[in-house]
Amino acid sequence: KQEVTQIPAALSVPEGENLVLNCSFTDSAIYNLQWFRQDPGKGLTSLLLIQSSQREQTSGRLNASLDKSSGRSTLYIAASQPGDSATYLCAVVGYSGGGADGLTFGKGTHLIIQP
Amino acid sequence: NAGVTQTPKFRVLKTGQSMTLLCAQDMNHEYMYWYRQDPGMGLRLIHYSVGEGTTAKGEVPDGYNVSRLKKQNFLLGLESAAPSQTSVYFCASSKGYVFQPQHFGDGTRLSIL
Protein backbone atom coordinates (compact mmCIF):
# COMPACT_ATOMS: atom_id res chain seq x y z
CA LYS A 1 0.00 0.00 0.00
CA GLN A 2 1.31 3.44 -0.97
CA GLU A 3 2.37 5.63 1.94
CA VAL A 4 3.24 9.31 1.67
CA THR A 5 5.33 11.02 4.35
CA GLN A 6 5.98 14.73 4.73
CA ILE A 7 8.83 16.19 6.72
CA PRO A 8 8.83 18.39 8.69
CA ALA A 9 5.33 18.31 10.17
CA ALA A 10 5.66 21.98 11.08
CA LEU A 11 8.03 24.76 10.12
CA SER A 12 8.36 28.39 11.20
CA VAL A 13 10.74 30.75 9.37
CA PRO A 14 11.26 34.51 9.11
CA GLU A 15 9.88 36.35 6.12
CA GLY A 16 12.18 36.46 3.10
CA GLU A 17 13.85 33.10 3.61
CA ASN A 18 13.96 30.40 0.97
CA LEU A 19 12.64 27.07 2.23
CA VAL A 20 12.21 23.45 1.21
CA LEU A 21 9.39 21.08 2.09
CA ASN A 22 9.95 17.37 1.68
CA CYS A 23 7.69 14.55 0.55
CA SER A 24 8.51 10.86 0.20
CA PHE A 25 6.45 7.95 -1.10
CA THR A 26 6.98 4.23 -0.76
CA ASP A 27 5.87 2.95 -4.20
CA SER A 28 7.47 4.46 -7.31
CA ALA A 29 4.60 3.26 -9.52
CA ILE A 30 2.93 6.65 -9.82
CA TYR A 31 1.25 8.62 -12.57
CA ASN A 32 1.85 11.98 -10.98
CA LEU A 33 2.62 13.88 -7.80
CA GLN A 34 0.73 16.97 -6.73
CA TRP A 35 1.37 19.70 -4.20
CA PHE A 36 -1.60 21.43 -2.58
CA ARG A 37 -2.04 24.31 -0.20
CA GLN A 38 -4.73 24.32 2.51
CA ASP A 39 -5.67 27.44 4.44
CA PRO A 40 -7.48 27.10 7.80
CA GLY A 41 -11.14 26.19 7.35
CA LYS A 42 -10.75 25.97 3.60
CA GLY A 43 -10.38 23.34 0.95
CA LEU A 44 -7.25 22.42 -0.94
CA THR A 45 -5.77 24.53 -3.72
CA SER A 46 -3.66 22.77 -6.33
CA LEU A 47 -0.22 24.38 -6.63
CA LEU A 48 1.79 22.12 -8.92
CA LEU A 49 1.31 18.80 -10.67
CA ILE A 50 4.34 16.82 -11.86
CA GLN A 51 3.81 13.97 -14.27
CA SER A 52 5.87 10.83 -13.63
CA SER A 53 7.99 11.55 -16.73
CA GLN A 54 8.87 15.06 -15.56
CA ARG A 55 11.58 16.15 -13.16
CA GLU A 56 10.23 19.51 -12.04
CA GLN A 57 7.52 22.13 -12.38
CA THR A 58 7.63 25.84 -11.62
CA SER A 59 4.98 28.39 -10.83
CA GLY A 60 6.07 31.84 -9.73
CA ARG A 61 8.10 31.50 -6.52
CA LEU A 62 7.31 27.79 -6.27
CA ASN A 63 9.39 24.97 -7.71
CA ALA A 64 8.61 21.31 -7.24
CA SER A 65 10.96 18.49 -8.13
CA LEU A 66 10.34 14.78 -8.49
CA ASP A 67 12.77 11.87 -8.22
CA LYS A 68 10.53 8.91 -8.87
CA SER A 69 13.24 6.28 -8.51
CA SER A 70 14.08 7.39 -4.98
CA GLY A 71 10.47 8.16 -4.07
CA ARG A 72 11.06 11.80 -3.22
CA SER A 73 9.74 15.23 -4.06
CA THR A 74 10.60 18.68 -2.77
CA LEU A 75 8.67 21.93 -2.84
CA TYR A 76 10.94 24.96 -2.90
CA ILE A 77 9.47 28.32 -1.91
CA ALA A 78 11.60 31.34 -2.74
CA ALA A 79 11.53 34.62 -0.83
CA SER A 80 8.81 33.50 1.57
CA GLN A 81 6.01 35.90 2.55
CA PRO A 82 3.50 35.89 5.44
CA GLY A 83 0.80 35.06 2.91
CA ASP A 84 2.54 31.74 2.28
CA SER A 85 1.52 30.58 5.75
CA ALA A 86 -0.66 27.49 5.29
CA THR A 87 -0.54 23.71 5.38
CA TYR A 88 1.14 22.17 2.35
CA LEU A 89 0.04 18.71 1.26
CA CYS A 90 1.72 16.28 -1.08
CA ALA A 91 -0.26 13.58 -2.89
CA VAL A 92 0.44 10.89 -5.48
CA VAL A 93 -1.73 9.07 -8.00
CA GLY A 94 -0.45 5.53 -8.15
CA TYR A 95 -1.32 2.66 -10.43
CA SER A 96 -1.84 -1.02 -9.92
CA GLY A 97 -2.90 -3.91 -12.08
CA GLY A 98 -6.43 -2.56 -12.23
CA GLY A 99 -5.46 0.89 -13.44
CA ALA A 100 -5.05 4.23 -11.69
CA ASP A 101 -5.51 4.39 -7.96
CA GLY A 102 -6.89 7.39 -6.12
CA LEU A 103 -4.85 10.20 -4.63
CA THR A 104 -2.82 9.17 -1.58
CA PHE A 105 -2.07 12.15 0.63
CA GLY A 106 0.63 12.92 3.12
CA LYS A 107 -0.36 14.50 6.42
CA GLY A 108 1.05 17.87 5.48
CA THR A 109 3.58 20.43 6.62
CA HIS A 110 2.17 23.34 8.63
CA LEU A 111 4.16 26.40 7.55
CA ILE A 112 4.30 29.71 9.41
CA ILE A 113 6.12 32.68 7.92
CA GLN A 114 6.96 35.23 10.60
CA PRO A 115 6.62 38.89 9.52
CA ASN B 1 -16.85 31.30 -11.27
CA ALA B 2 -18.05 29.19 -8.31
CA GLY B 3 -15.93 26.07 -8.93
CA VAL B 4 -16.89 23.37 -6.43
CA THR B 5 -19.65 24.19 -3.94
CA GLN B 6 -20.50 22.05 -0.93
CA THR B 7 -23.74 22.18 1.01
CA PRO B 8 -24.11 22.44 4.00
CA LYS B 9 -20.94 23.94 5.51
CA PHE B 10 -21.68 22.72 9.04
CA ARG B 11 -24.01 20.12 10.50
CA VAL B 12 -24.55 18.38 13.81
CA LEU B 13 -26.33 15.03 13.83
CA LYS B 14 -27.35 12.52 16.45
CA THR B 15 -26.22 8.93 16.19
CA GLY B 16 -28.51 6.99 13.88
CA GLN B 17 -29.76 9.98 11.91
CA SER B 18 -29.34 10.16 8.18
CA MET B 19 -28.28 13.01 5.94
CA THR B 20 -27.02 13.85 2.48
CA LEU B 21 -24.10 16.10 1.59
CA LEU B 22 -24.35 17.85 -1.75
CA CYS B 23 -21.47 18.73 -4.05
CA ALA B 24 -21.95 20.82 -7.18
CA GLN B 25 -19.34 21.79 -9.79
CA ASP B 26 -19.73 24.20 -12.68
CA MET B 27 -16.57 23.29 -14.61
CA ASN B 28 -18.10 20.45 -16.66
CA HIS B 29 -15.68 17.99 -15.06
CA GLU B 30 -16.13 14.27 -15.63
CA TYR B 31 -14.54 13.10 -12.38
CA MET B 32 -15.80 13.81 -8.88
CA TYR B 33 -14.58 12.64 -5.48
CA TRP B 34 -15.52 12.59 -1.81
CA TYR B 35 -12.78 12.67 0.84
CA ARG B 36 -12.77 12.83 4.59
CA GLN B 37 -10.07 14.62 6.57
CA ASP B 38 -9.33 13.58 10.13
CA PRO B 39 -6.58 14.80 12.49
CA GLY B 40 -3.52 12.59 12.23
CA MET B 41 -4.99 10.61 9.32
CA GLY B 42 -4.77 13.02 6.42
CA LEU B 43 -7.29 12.97 3.58
CA ARG B 44 -8.77 9.63 2.57
CA LEU B 45 -10.88 8.86 -0.47
CA ILE B 46 -14.41 7.63 0.32
CA HIS B 47 -16.02 7.23 -3.12
CA TYR B 48 -15.50 8.66 -6.55
CA SER B 49 -17.24 8.91 -9.92
CA VAL B 50 -15.75 8.79 -13.40
CA GLY B 51 -18.86 10.18 -15.08
CA GLU B 52 -22.61 10.69 -14.84
CA GLY B 53 -24.33 7.58 -13.55
CA THR B 54 -21.12 5.92 -12.30
CA THR B 55 -19.69 5.48 -8.81
CA ALA B 56 -16.78 3.53 -7.34
CA LYS B 57 -15.41 2.78 -3.88
CA GLY B 58 -12.35 4.46 -2.50
CA GLU B 59 -10.23 3.65 0.53
CA VAL B 60 -12.89 4.09 3.25
CA PRO B 61 -16.36 3.51 1.71
CA ASP B 62 -18.10 1.69 4.57
CA GLY B 63 -21.11 3.53 6.03
CA TYR B 64 -21.47 5.85 3.02
CA ASN B 65 -23.41 5.77 -0.23
CA VAL B 66 -23.10 8.06 -3.23
CA SER B 67 -25.03 8.97 -6.35
CA ARG B 68 -24.19 10.90 -9.52
CA LEU B 69 -27.49 11.36 -11.32
CA LYS B 70 -26.36 14.59 -12.98
CA LYS B 71 -22.87 15.35 -14.24
CA GLN B 72 -22.55 18.47 -12.11
CA ASN B 73 -23.70 16.93 -8.82
CA PHE B 74 -22.23 14.26 -6.55
CA LEU B 75 -24.15 13.32 -3.40
CA LEU B 76 -22.73 11.64 -0.32
CA GLY B 77 -25.21 9.92 1.99
CA LEU B 78 -24.94 8.69 5.55
CA GLU B 79 -27.79 6.26 6.19
CA SER B 80 -27.22 5.80 9.94
CA ALA B 81 -24.65 8.25 11.27
CA ALA B 82 -22.06 7.06 13.79
CA PRO B 83 -19.67 9.10 15.97
CA SER B 84 -16.75 7.66 13.96
CA GLN B 85 -18.06 9.59 10.97
CA THR B 86 -17.38 12.92 12.67
CA SER B 87 -15.01 14.56 10.22
CA VAL B 88 -14.51 17.27 7.65
CA TYR B 89 -15.76 16.13 4.26
CA PHE B 90 -14.31 17.49 1.04
CA CYS B 91 -15.62 17.16 -2.45
CA ALA B 92 -13.35 17.56 -5.47
CA SER B 93 -13.64 17.39 -9.23
CA SER B 94 -11.24 17.08 -12.14
CA LYS B 95 -11.32 17.13 -15.92
CA GLY B 96 -9.28 13.93 -16.12
CA TYR B 97 -8.27 11.30 -13.61
CA VAL B 98 -4.53 11.13 -13.98
CA PHE B 99 -3.16 14.18 -15.78
CA GLN B 100 -5.29 17.02 -14.44
CA PRO B 101 -5.35 18.49 -10.93
CA GLN B 102 -8.33 18.11 -8.63
CA HIS B 103 -10.32 21.19 -7.58
CA PHE B 104 -11.67 21.14 -4.04
CA GLY B 105 -14.65 22.65 -2.29
CA ASP B 106 -14.36 24.36 1.09
CA GLY B 107 -15.60 21.35 3.03
CA THR B 108 -18.48 20.30 5.26
CA ARG B 109 -17.76 20.04 8.97
CA LEU B 110 -19.92 17.22 10.34
CA SER B 111 -20.27 16.28 14.00
CA ILE B 112 -22.09 13.15 15.13
CA LEU B 113 -23.13 13.16 18.77
Image (tube, coloured by chain):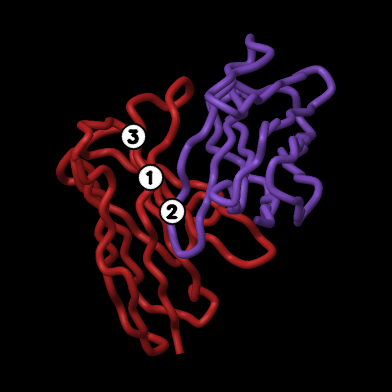
Chain colours: A purple, B red
Residue B59 screen position, x and y as percent: 56, 50
**SS at badge 3:** strand
Mark yes or no: residue A99 visible: no
The amino acid type found where label 1 is placed reads Ala
Q: Is residue B78 left or right of residue A96?
A: left
Residue annotated with mark 3: B31
Question: Which residue, given by chain and number where applicable, does mark 2 sit on?
Answer: A43
| Residue at x 56%, y 53% (from the top left corner) | B43
Asked if residue B39 is positioned above or below residue A46 in the image, the reply reads: below
Alpha-carbon distance for marks 1 and 2? 9 Å
Q: Amino acid at mark 3?
A: Tyr
Of A13 and B2, which appears nearest the observer? Answer: A13
Q: How many marks?
A: 3
Q: Which residue is mark 1?
A: B92
Instruction: Say left or right for B60 vs B77.
Output: right
Number of residues whose C-alpha sits closer than 10 Å to that of mark 3, classed few (under 14), some (14–19) or many (20 or more): many
- In percent of the image, x 45 and y 47: which residue is there? B57
- Viewport quadrant of the N terminus of chain A: top right
- In the picture as drawn, the residue positioned furthest to the right comes out as A70
Q: Are marks 1 and 2 on the same chain?
A: no
